[in-house]
Amino acid sequence: MSDDESYLLEVAAVDREAFVLCLALGTLVAMRSDSWPLEAGIWTLGRPTFLRPVASGVVSPEVVAELEAVDELEALAKLAGRPVVDAALDQMMAAIRSRLSALKERPWRASWTHKPADGTMRGDPERPGPPHADSSILI
């Protein structure tokens, strides 16, 4: 794969919240377990290109408030130590788990679309054709 290639992940609008919550929970768990560095929050969940659409109604305001703090975790670790950061991560994960529990009857579905360097789109063979009007491209 060249640097010019990319993949788009198509998620139906009705599945966005569950998808975002699962993505966020997995990222926070990885950070909490030291599988990923704390700075990963800045470059993933804390990026404005990710967080702005999420904050515009994709997830509850309570979860958005927790996610907005993710870009401060590395600085918090330097100032207050890892135990304080772990407590903050635990709080973030609890908020996400709480909201996910309300969606447990709503699993998300997604499909990948490959965009090679030549600019053509190659979608999921199970769902041929262009992206659908009822979808949101998240990644």
Image: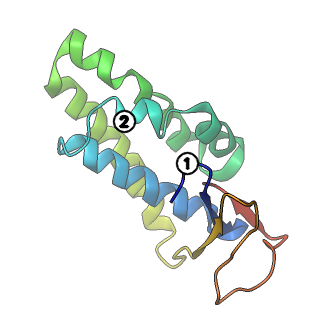
Q: Nearer the viewer, residue 13 or 39?
A: 39
Q: Residues within 10 Å of mark 1 (few under 14, many from 20)?
A: few
Work out whether mark 1 precedes mark 2 in sequence or the reverse, and give the earlier one: 1
Label 2's element?
Answer: helix
The residues tagged by marks 1 and 2 sit, at their Cα atoms, a distance apart of 21 Å
Vertical position of residue 107 compared to residue 116: above or below: below
Q: Is residue 121 left or right of residue 92?
A: right
Q: On the image, numbered disc 2 is attached to which residue?
A: 40
Vertical position of residue 102 compared to residue 126: above or below: above
Vertical position of residue 43 compared to residue 135: above or below: above
Residue drawn at the location 33% of the way across and 25% of the way down: 73
Q: Residue 83, percent across and down?
A: 14, 27
Q: Residues within 10 Å of mark 2 (few under 14, many from 20)?
A: some
Residue drawn at the location 32% of the way across and 39% of the way down: 91
Q: Residue 30, percent across and down?
A: 26, 48
Q: Nearer the viewer, residue 94 or 82?
A: 82
Query: Residue 51 falls in which quadrant of the image?
Result: top right
Kindly identify the amino acid type of the residue bearing the numbered disc 1: Asp
Kindly identify the amino acid type of the residue bearing the numbered disc 2: Ala
Q: On the image, numbered disc 1 is attached to which residue?
A: 3
